[in-house]
Amino acid sequence: MVARVTLEIALRKEFDYSIPPELEGRVEVGTRVKVPFGRREVLGCVTSLTQQSEHNSLKPITKIIGAQSLVTPRVLELARWIAEYYCCAPETALKSVLPDAVRKEQEGWRERLFVRLLPGPEGVESLTKRQQEIYQVIEQNRSIALQELLKITGTTAATVRKLEDRGLVEIAPQISERDPYAKEEIIPTRPLKLNPEQAAALKAVNDKPGEFFLLHGVTGSGKTEVYLQAIAHALEQGNGAIVLVPEISLTPQTVERFKARFSSGPIKTLVAVLHSHLSAGERHDEWHKIRQGRAKIVIGARSAIFAPIEPLGLIIVDEEHEPSYKQEEAPRYHARDVAVVRGQREGATVVLGSATPSMESYHNAQRGRYNLLTLPTRVDDKKMPLVRVQDMCTEKSKDDQGPPIFSQRLKEAIYNRLEQGEQTILFLNRRGFATSMQCPDCGFVAECPNCSLSLTYHRREQFLRCHVCGHNARAPQRCPEVKCGSSKIRFHGLGTEKVEDVLRKLFPNANVTRMDSDALKRKDDYRRILGDFRRGKIDILVGTQMIAKGLHFPRVTLVGIVYADTGLHLADFRAGERTFQLLTQVAGRAGRGEVEGEVVVQTFSPVHPAIQFSRRHDYEGYFEAEMEFREQLRYPPFTRAAMLTLRGRSEEKVSFSAEHLKKQIEPIVQKLTDLQISGPAPAPLLRAETFYRYQIMLRTGRMSDLSRYLADITASLNFPDEVNLTVDIDPVNLL
């Protein structure tokens, strides 16, 4: 028997190895192996088994990694599809389907000493009073970790050993799983009564196994309850489920709700969690929990789509419109699209859920590719929040230094909520204190030495920071220009840090907390802040997009969007769509309790369609307007796009290479007659992380064919030193 192995080195081919007698019967498709390659040994994955090879004198497999195959044959096929469609090396795709801790087997099972009660309590009466107290604790638990026992009883290991010597207990090593949510108190919950729209959606999902659904429900319409009951149905059918969430920050809240629902009852099952904030040991244990079939529900960010659940009955992609589902490093897959492909290949039902679906998904629903399900009202008939648009062009600051941070309307609204003991969320999708530092005397602007970008001022640390490459520099007290040296240096623009600072001055008695990536230093900061907010300890929560979606706080009655224009005018055809989605999602945090919510949107572009349609909670209206624009310019979803980016430290070499690449692509037009080539042109952010970047955008309705052509072209091209090419199929970030 011969094993065909894909190695974890960039060779874009498979190699044949013989299976030694001692490993016969243990090597199967998906098995992780260590094999000789040249003078070293490398890791790889068995992708197929054959009776013979065209090569002679095959080297044998050295070692099997793991007790069982870590990649299921179906996930392996999915990795092959990713390699072909997203135009990347097979070994790169294979690496993505396994967490590093599992792939390299760096972490094994953790063993701990456990104290286990033995049958036959003879001799208990002769124990000392202290020994009896310890024995009672063991008796209550039947089995308990030795370290935990010592902590509870305040005793020593020697004392417990005396109980073992008497034959009352046994102390032995036992596998102890690392559970990231072990300390959480989970209170079981029962299914809620569904309203007619929810019930109809659930029936459609349950009655049509293996089909694709787009669940379009307004914020607060109860999509999660539909997910929970659909999963319960899948479990009753003997199937497992995968639930994708867009942000790691949303995972704890989702996990708690799902564990509470499936921690008891006839369909009780373990819920596994997969995301990058777990420790290596936790990732190891969670993955094996799934592979062994003990966990039938998996919750996680985009990589959780590769979880080895068998059989797979249901895939849910919550907030399917979120750009975070797109991987920005190779393989540049989109988890939502991979979910659809996996569902198609394994006969699993796929549910894409959102209050603001992506243009692509809603277009697919309109064309009949997906079944469209709608939840047009909030649960319990709660009203959607009233949205007020404030034109900031009409606002004047006291010192006439330009528009203020807060309009009079927003300040009054915040004051009223504080008086009534209600909570407020303020949203600004920009970190830091000020977006730039400038000298009014000579015009100097502090710019990043590595990127075509001004540095953001962070006042708390007194640092200037680039949010692209991470460059840090101490904020100067005077203009750094030698000929100037002025002390009149000024900071312009604003970020969440400045908003927080101004709020504390305006409302000194209010408890104001900021939540962005700068404020979250420790692993549990996110959960701690949200816990405090839920308990009413925080009056005003200021944050970036991490507070914009998926959060349910009944006491929040006011949402203020400080500047709605932040991402509206970017050089990206999706800028309007993203602004509409973000505003709608943030607005949806208000009015989820008994009191009707209010939203104040501050903007310098009050008549923009994204602003006006979000004000009316009119997704269909915005969709029609946006699609008219997309169709005229042949942008997705009417075509599919590929972005080719060349980067290097010499702008001249990058520009030359981009022109050469275009010439190699142009003949493809004869085969793909609908292919449109735009560029090459400098990227909107020309220089990033010391690299100059030029882009070529390709658009076609036949992306699978284009991917194959691009793979052949890119494999044969040789670029100048330090010039690299990345191919991004279906890009979501054009900057």
Image (cartoon, rainbow, N blue to C red):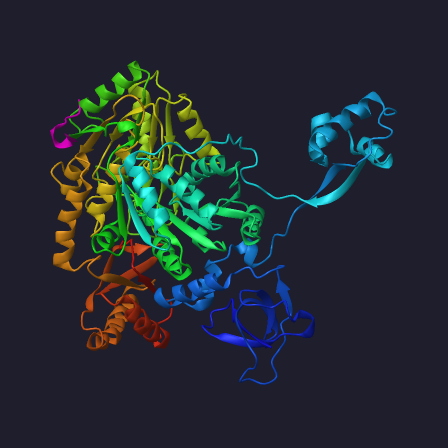
The residue nearer to you, when weighing 284 against 390, is 284
- Indicate the quadrant where residue 330 lies: bottom left
Q: Quadrant of residue 138?
A: top right
Q: Residue at x 55, y 82 (%)?
A: 53
Residue sitting nearer the eye, 101 or 705: 705
Q: Which residues are magenta?
A: 390-398
Asked whether residue 237 appears in the rendered view, the answer is yes
Asked if residue 363 is among those painted magenta in the image, a careful observer would answer no
* Residue 199 lies in quadrant: top left
Residue 278: x percent and y percent? 52, 45
Horizontal placement of 432 versus 11: left or right?
left
**Residue 368 placement (x, y as % from top left):** 23, 55
Up the image or down, 297 lies above or below 521; here it is below
144 left or right of 606? Answer: right
Q: Quadrant of the N terminus?
A: bottom right
Q: Residue at x 18, y 39 (%)?
A: 618
When the figure is inspected, residue 247 is found, relative to residue 402, above or below; the finding is below
Q: Is residue 158 left or right of residue 366?
A: right
Q: Is residue 332 visible?
A: no
Near-viewer residue (441 or 203): 203
Where does the image place residue 398, in percent across and percent down from the top left? 17, 22
